[in-house]
Amino acid sequence: MKFDSKELSIVISALVIQLVVPSVFPNLHKILDNSVLFAAPVNSFRSLKEGIFLLRNGLNPYSGTIIHHPPILVSLFTVINENELVTNLIYALADLVTALNLIRINEWFMKQEVEASNEKGEKIQTKQEYFANWIVYAWYFFNPLGITSIFSRSTTVFTNMFIMITLKSLCYQELSVAVMSLSVATYLSYHPWYYILPVVCYIIKSKPEEHPWKIVVKAVGLFVSGLFGLLYLSFQLTGSWQFLTNYETIVMFHKITPNLGLWWYFFTEIFQFFNNFFVGVFNLYTFIFIVPFTLRFGKTKRDLMFALWVSIGFVNFAKAYPTISDLSLFHCLVLEWKPLFKNLRINPVISYMLTYVLLALLPVFYYVWMELNSGNSNFFYAIGLVFSTVEAVFLSDFIWSKLCEEYGGARRDLTQI
Amino acid sequence: MLLQSIWTLVLLACSVDATANTYPFKERLDLTPLPRNNLLASFNFELDSNDIQLYSDGDSISTHYTVFPRSFGPILKTTRARELHLRFSQGWWDSEVWGSLPRNGSTAGGTGVEIWSLIEADDKAQALESWVKLVNSLSGLFCASFNFIDESITTYPVKTLQPYSSFYQKVQPEKQLYLLRSALPREPICTENLTPFIKILPAKGKAGISSLLNGHKVFNSQWSSMSIDILTECDDSLICNYNLKQAIDVVLNVPKTIDRALNPIPKPTPGEELRCDQSKTHNVFQCFPLGEKTDMSWDLKTLFGTTINGGSSISSEPSKVCAHVNHEHWKVYAVTGTGDDEKFTVVDDCADLDVKSTTNFLFSTDESNNVVALNKPPVMTSRSLTGHSQDSGGFRTDFANISEDKDVDLVFFETLPWFVRIFLHTMDITITKPDKSTVTYSISDPLSETVLKQIYYSPAVDRKAPTHLELLLRIPAGCSVTLNYQFDKSMLLYAEYPPDANHGFEIDPAVISVIGEEGNEIYHFRTTTSLLTLPTPDFSMPYNVIILTSTVMSLAFGGIFNLLVKRVVTQEQADSLAKVSPLYRVSEKLGRVRTRIRQLLGRA
């Protein structure tokens, strides 16, 4: 990995911030972790620490329904022994790995464009079509979404890292690494298995010489065996299958806590008779666009990358326990779609301003509800709903822009005819 | 003549029978004046059943219960409950003023209702089934909401409330024994709970000391506690019977109770009866009130509204009333009979009640605060909620060992409802030494083991099991220890909130059992209940929420779906594509048909 001076200074300053700030403010992660924007029951660091505590005292953390972290993660953190510095270092490293992979993806996109233009004999100025590495670094490291999710020590950081590794490995034809890291991400937080479909399609695209069914069997087989390997290891670690309730909690939405998403207030208020039905509907809704995205954007590798990206975005919008750390993964990849910016109906500056204003309002309304009691749950819900709407509009705007790009391509083809 | 003599004989036989036939039943009333003009009245009843068959079907052998309440036998038998303990309490025992609890707290409960039982069953599931059956039967019997007890509020105590019947010690049971416990802290204790208590006594409140028990008086008290303990007692030849102990303890504030008896409708005290501080300005307009009178005389009739209606005629020993007073300052008289036959007897310690006549007790004192030396409780405890947010909070529990040279071992038993998600790793222990220096240990710190000897923890399962926490603590002499821990509160489903959700949820009182040198429980007490507020949704919103959320979801779906099925092409491409689509052909055909019809119609 080569850095130029700008990149290096950004990476080093980011690392310094990530190590120094938590040491100077040791309570920062507790404050952020108490906020529902950063911590859901399934990814809060406090709950992970409780798991470590129980494990160390010889109790099965999964006999109750307090801990929803996968056993291997809990065991790994038990080894660290709650050393603050090591914990900070681990989160900083995870962040760095994510960033490095992101840069590699950025480079791949640039290369793709150059190749595409070479094929067509055109000279497209890559520098203008894509952002320079240092901008991507800066956007990733100094984005409040990313940096606060590192400070909150949300375990979604690790899921993000593995998904990023998957994307990068896909770009660089390290296909088994991609599938394996996707299975780790699935093990960590359930939802990433949705992405197996675009990933398999991508592999089929990148290996045109092999029979598609063979690839499907291989990739899915690798994914499933990786996942089962991890689950079996967890079983060996805890001595029972009780830890599977983690995934049950995510699917069945057992723990109702306010969050950024659409589920919590709906399931608080829905009549109990319909509860199970709507759990089914909402899960289906989360999955519903994976297949269409893959089919619609399945022509080239770049298109499949887009399919993966919008899938991540839609799952964030529709899943049960979304947090800011989930958003961070989606939004750090947005720079890779610079070519689409020009066709957006809403300027990204405006949509980001909206997003940040809403994200700032959410904790305010939460505070007004929980602490001051001068507002009720509707305030928080309303802002959350607006936030979700903005996310959905943002996503569909990019899809629109992608269609425009296709139109541009079509026009280009036509003119060539 | 002959007839008359036969009648005499029959009558004689009957009367002989009536006097000679006594049953295993004892009753005793202890009256202990407490400081600040309070009176502790402890009613004790104890009765035994006939011998029972522990392991028979029951139908083959008819069971005769004599004084043992008929309603209990079959319930205990079908549920195989070997011990049953019930507590109904309200108010707060002020141990700093009143000293240790009566009977070392073994019969005192926390606010609300508490029940625990030793049940013999094949496995845990069967034990739970019997338990639910048991509490449901008792629910009707005691007019209490026992029927709301289910697995989500039932715990299996490990170190505290341990069984102590001779059955437990001697008999090798056929099946496993399970100890189950539940509490309903929100249950108001009222007259309808007292009535069944009196009903199960042989005299049913008509005679003996139970004739004093009147709901209005018992529940207008500072503190009251009713308890029933049923044990299975077995001798060495393994012949068993049920032993039932019933206790009702009441602390009455004497001036208040008398005031209420004399003036049922409260009226302002007339000016000349006001007790003003003579050392300060006092005139028609100004009066600095003095404290309560300390030279008083009062009798049971004023306090309880009635005299004791004779002793119990069927008990194995005479009904007893005992007064525990400081004889230097107190005089106690038993007053038997009424009107001209009134007879005063000085009571030194205990008096047997006369079966035939009514008895009243008269107390007079020149210094009512001078009472018999009170036992200090071994440890003082208070528990409070910390935090100010509706979504999280914490518990802080203080233990103070007032003895200067003896460490106290105790078991701290706490159950929390499932929607309270406690984080045990946040627990820290602060020790305040006699010289006021403090030291704080986190629970993960090995040094905390000087205080925290052992932990039993079973985490909550959503809607299935409460958090069950038992801590074995050693409070060093003269020190006070503070436990602190944090928890999160989850939201409930719409229907799971009680009607007045913003009132909050009562948390069971924590049970503290002080462990003696031989490892047995020597003193019990409970903390107060805590009122926990949960985050509540807006209960008027279900339709709005369903509509708004669904709208956003379908907007997102519709928008994206609409884009996905679109293909962006040029106008020319669109036209040429449309020409080959079957839909276009059909519509074109339809158009042609339509023009034909129009033409036809136009022609017609």
Image (tube, coloured by chain):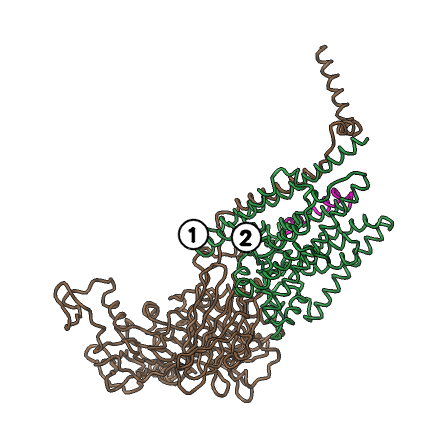
Chain colours: A green, B brown
Kindly report the secondary structure that dominates the magenta region of the rendered protein.
helix
Farthest top residue in view: B603
Marks 1/2: CA distance?
Answer: 21 Å
For label 2, the crowd category at 10 Å Cα-Cα, with few meaning under 14, some 14 to 19 and many 20 or more, is many
Q: How many numbered markers are drawn?
A: 2
Residue A82 in the image: state x and y as whole percent.
60, 70
Farthest front residue in view: A5
- Is residue B4 something one can see in this rendering? yes
> Range of the magenta residues?
A279-300
Asked whether A359 or B15 is in front, the reply is A359
Q: Nearer the viewer, mark 1 or mark 2?
A: 1
Asked whether A148 or A376 is in front, the reply is A148
Vertical comparison of A27 with B82: above or below: above
Asked whether A358 or B222 is in front, the reply is A358
Q: Quadrant of the C terminus of chain B?
A: top right
Identified at 29% across, 84% down, the residue is B325
Residue of label 1: A374
Vertical comparison of A193 with B112: above or below: above
Look at the numbered disc 1 and give the secondary structure of its residue: loop
Look at the numbered disc 2 and give the secondary structure of its residue: helix
Q: Quadrant of the N terminus of chain B?
A: bottom left
Both labels 1 and 2 in a single chain: yes
Identified at 23% across, 65% down, the residue is B263
Residue of label 2: A268
Mark 1 vs 2, N-terminal side: 2
Residue B482 shown in magenta: no
